[in-house]
Every structure is written in C-alpha cells, then in structure tokens.
Amino acid sequence: MKTLKEILDNSKRIVFFTGAGVSTESGIPDFRSVDGLYNMKYDYPPEEILSHTFFVENTEEFYRFYRDKMLCMRAKPNPAHIKIAELEEVGKVLSVVTQNIDGLHQAAGSKKVFELHGSVHRNFCMKCHKEYDSKFILNSNTVVPKCTCGGIIKPDVVLYEEPLDETVVKESIKTISQSDTLIIAGTSLSVYPAASYVRYFGGENLVLINRDKTKMDTAADLVIHDKVGETLSRYIVK
C-alpha cells in the first residue's frame, strides 16, 4: 500500500483498465472464477448463450438468461468505483477503459468511461433503431422485448462473434498510450481483443490489482492480489 500510495500521489495521467472483478463487490457475478457464471449449470453453456448466433436462433432463451444474470439493476457502486471517480474529480485520472457493461463507473461519478463491451443500459430496436433503457427490457410483458414498430430489441452489448466498436477501441488505445500510470483492476486479462490493448501502455507505472494471478503479473511494476475495492479504499484522495 505504501508503494501504491506513492504511485498515485505522483501520477497525473492515470488510466484504469477494469474488469468484472471491480463489480463483484457490488454483488455482480464475474465469469471465470470458481463461482462465476461460466461455472454455473444451465441448459446451454453461458458462452454459447452470449453469442450472436444464439441471440438470433434462440432469442427467448437468451433473454431468460440475460434478465436473470446480466441485468443486475439493484447493484450499487462499491468503494472501487467511488475511489476511481474521486481520483478523476481531482484531476488525476484521464479515463476508465472497462470491459464491464453494468454502468457502475458512471453511477459512481466517472465522466470519461470507454465501454469496450457496451452497456446493459442501452438497447435498440433492430428494425427502426429506436432506443430503450434497461428498465424497459426488465419489465417487458413479453419474453422477447418488442419495439412499438414490432421489431426485436437488442441490448447494446458486444456478444461473442460481434466486433467491438471501432471508435471506442481507438479512443481506448489512445488514452492508454497517453497515461503515465496504467492500473489494471479486477481482470484476468483473458478476454481478447480487449486485453491486448494494455500493451499500448508506455508510461512509468504499470499496476495490477486482482484477486488472482494474471499473465501480466511479471510485467507489472506493482502487483496486489486482493479485492480492488478493499485495496483502493485504503487510499485517501488529496
């Protein structure tokens, strides 16, 4: 913590690269841990359910899983989200690049957030492109939510087999390359291509905060194997 404090105190252009481990302390399950979504038993593997092909061919089953496991509407920002927002408010954080789709960074007050995998809070009609919020999806009176035009509504999240938004990718790479400190938090760095973007970092301090070991541990200047919220909450923002 002493080393982390020194790094945060002396940094002026911090970028946080966050994953599911940042939101687990808010009660949102991650994917790959022992008790994560990918180790739960369903009629279909979650990896298959969260694919573009499955959405098109089994839309009702997709939405049953999606409402049950992906729409965590009661989740609130935890100390990790709050501390990152505080650091941005005092001018230390350039941006947050996140793999999460829960919108908790924005709910905590972060202004510049690049959502690589989209957001559950944005949904659109595949026919007329009318936009809907997450409450509409959650409270729809049909299993598959329909637009007023009759079209199927799709969450604005990146499913397997779908490309990432080019603009978001470019801006994410740009802000990572401009940072003096990159803090990788709550991610196993197993999801590509998102995980590859951290290699554009050329600044002074590479910090990794994650409960488990990752493939980047040996390359980091500081590694903390602990919960992100508990770790960041110990730092007092000046």
Image (cartoon, helix red, strand yellow):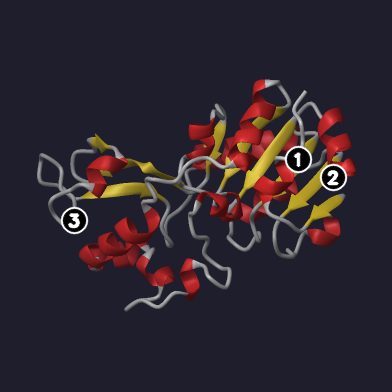
Q: Is residue 218 left or right of residue 37?
A: right
- Quarter holding residue 212: bottom right
User: Looking at the picture, which amino acid does disc 1 mark?
Assistant: Arg
The one nearer the camera, 233 or 30, is: 233
The mark closer to the camera, 3 or 2, is 2
Residue drawn 18% across and 50% down? 145
Instruction: Name the amino acid, label 2.
Output: Met
Marks 1 and 3: in contact by CB < 8 Å? no
Q: Determine whether 56 is above or below 117 in the image.
A: below
What whole-number distance in Å separates the C-alpha atoms at marks 3 and 1? 44 Å
Q: Are marks 2 and 1 in contact (CB under 8 Å)?
A: yes
Q: Position of residue 179 (x, y in %)?
A: 75, 34
- Circle 2 residues within 10 Å: few <14, some 14–19, many ≥20: few
Q: CA distance from mark 2 to mark 1?
A: 8 Å
Say which quadrant the C terminus sits in. Answer: top right
Nearer to us in this view, 237 or 199: 237
Residue located beneath label 1 in the image = 234
Residue under label 3, please give it: 144
Q: Are marks 3 and 2 in contact (CB under 8 Å)?
A: no
Q: Position of residue 143 (x, y in %)?
A: 17, 58
| Other-residue count near label 1 (Cα within 10 Å), few / some / many at <14 / 14–19 / ≥20 | few
| In this picture, residue 87 sits left or right of residue 153 | right
Disc 3 residue type?
Val
* Residue displayed at 49% across by 54% down: 27
Q: Which residue is mark 2?
A: 1
Tell me the mark number nearer the camera, choosing from 3 and 1.
Answer: 1
